[in-house]
Amino acid sequence: MAVPAQATTPLFQSSFHKPNQDWTVVRGSATSDSSVLHGHNPSLRVERDGGSPDACIRLAPLTLALGKPYELSGWVRTGALEVRDLDRSPIASGATLTMDSMPFDVHSASVGGTEPWTHLTLRFVASRTRDQILLTVGNGGSFSGRAWFEGIQLDEISSADDWPAREAVQTFGPAYRRRRLDLSSH
């Protein structure tokens, strides 16, 4: 019988009280915004700048356990966020959460338009021992409007059936591979 996954103590919790405290602008612009609060906390307002069609904010580096499951979560609010495709595949996304180690098309749900605070989550298995959380807007395209992020958190999750088992993970530089289990013997 599988036991539901339970979150443990957060490995990371965001704080956007001070400019550039635990985050770096890769593309676009980002500003701590004390006029748009979530749970009495200032948010991070993300917009486009003249030099890039999309926006990407990289949070502080984290140490993860290779092969362990994690849950990335946070809140996003959007204002007139309109995303346009730039003739690439897959289709451009709105405001999302992802990890630096993930392909550009793997991310949380995408939020666009004008939406109130929306909770986003992304579960994944660590493929690197050092990784970073990315807040993206208009990834794979361009956008207009704004997005606000707050309450970004990373938790190691566990269950009685942690998979893949550490013994089943083989690393090849930054990549990893899981061996198949022979389920017929169970």
Image (cartoon, rainbow, N blue to C red):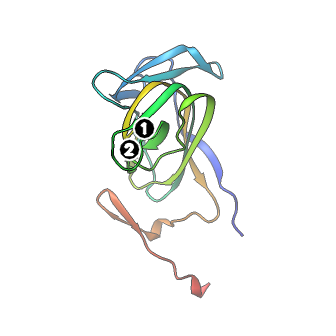
Number of numbered labels in the structure image: 2
The reply to whether dot 1 and dot 2 touch (C-beta < 8 Å) is: yes
Packing grade of label 2 (10 A; few <14, some 14-19, many >=20) is: some
Q: Which residue has dot 1 on it? A: 134
x then y, percent, for residue 13:
54, 33
Name the residue at 51% across, 78% down.
181
Residue at disc 1, secondary structure: strand
The N terminus: image quadrant: bottom right
What's under tag 1, amino acid-wise?
Leu
63 or 164, nearer to the observer: 164
Task: Confirm whether residue 29 shows in the render.
Answer: yes
On residue 94, the disc is none
On residue 100, the disc is 2
Name the residue at 52% across, 40% down.
110
Task: Confirm whether residue 138 shows in the render.
Answer: no
x then y, percent, for residue 101:
38, 49
